Image (spheres, rainbow, N blue to C red):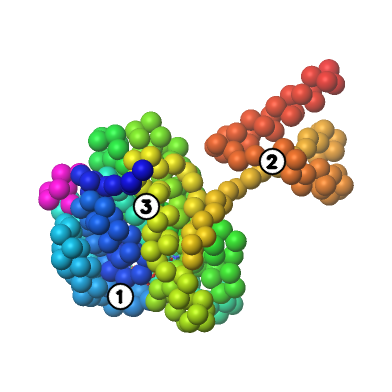
Amino acid sequence: MSIRFDGKVAIVTGAGNGLGRSHALELAARGAKVVINDLGGARDGVGASSEAADSVVAEIQAAGGEAFAHGANVAIFSEVEDMVAQTVAKWGQVDILINNAGILRDKSFSKMSIDDFKLVMDVHVMGAVNCSKAVWEIMKEQKYGRIVMTTSSSGLYGNFGQSNYGAAKMAVVGLMNTLAIEGAKYNVHVNALAPTAATRMTEDLMPAEVLAMLVPEAVTAGALTLCHDNAPSRFILCAGGGGYAKSSIFETDGIYLSPEQQNPEAVVANWEGICDTANQAELETGFKQSEKFLLKAQAYLQANQ
Ligand code: NAI
């Protein structure tokens, strides 16, 4: 089965470099019309330039594809709204949004300024919120939408020096969870991609021979599976160097403590039961957790009437 995007309109944020560029080129090669969004700043978010985005547009056009560049800063809603308005004016629809734009401001939490924390949150979290919000009603109305959040193993599991980035990358998973629930009945699927690739973001973090194996195209193969017609929804796909894996949040079945045992000593004494993974599950919504606990409490009350 060949995966095609003919007739689809895609917006890829941060598409001037690295992973976004690779996603955009492959979407265009497979038939999509693509908006190449990029602010064009440095890795830490300083500066702006249209050069990178323009060169990706030229590459797509030279290969016979359709694309235009937009320099919206994803952290600024009015600029994102303008990008979406231009897209609709030109192509009439928005089918795919890949929230990929990102910056780094690594420092240990002790040394990190609140400004560095906020800027990283703004670009990754508010960037994804702004872009998703600007296309949301369009996707709902056309009863078709595919949104990809770009998370990171740093958010899912933590990394030294990345409290800002990790917090932001987990926040977009939270955004995905609820948007996937709210989008379900409108055929709007929302997924997350946790990449590892050699880009300017990682060029000084790993040795050259490792970087050579981490080609962006391997991650793009994963990204495209999250935004085609038969894409799953609410899936966290990890991709890097040709490896692909699913990441999930599981909750153990847990235990019930009677009212007289609802104290820290009893919680500690029952730690093994709390951690027992035998019947662990992925929960569909937050309410499912409350429901599970209430069922346990009800069962106890019935047994002790
Ligand atoms: P990159 O630095 O090569 O590309 C990021 C692009 O986003 C740049 O072209 C930059 O100009 C653009 N950008 C930054 N701030 C922007 C803003 N406010 N508005 C619009 N565009 C903006 O980095 P890379 O590696 O391609 O990263 C892409 C995404 O993948 C990011 O979200 C990053 O956090 C994520 N990621 C990358 C990993 C890797 O191994 N390369 C690992 C985990 C996550």
110 sits left or right of 26 in the view: right
Give yes or no for contact between labels 3 and 2 (Cβ–Cβ under 8 Å).
no
Q: Give the secondary structure at mark 2.
A: loop
Between disc 1 and disc 2, the foreground one is: 2
Residue at mark 2: 280
Res 43 → quadrant: bottom left
Residue drawn at (34%, 54%), measured in percent from left and top?
Answer: 98
Residue at mark 3: 224
Name the mark on residue 41: 1
Q: Is residue 278 above or below residue 128?
A: above
Rendering coords of residue 12 (x, y %): 30, 58
Front one among 261 and 83: 83
Name the amino acid type tagged 3.
Leu
Between disc 1 and disc 3, the foreground one is: 3
Does mark 1 have its CB less than 8 Å from ligand 1? Answer: yes
Which quadrant does the N terminus fall into? top left
Which quadrant does the C terminus fall into? top right
156 drawn magenta: no
Stretch in magenta: 87-93
Rendering coords of residue 17 (x, y %): 32, 70
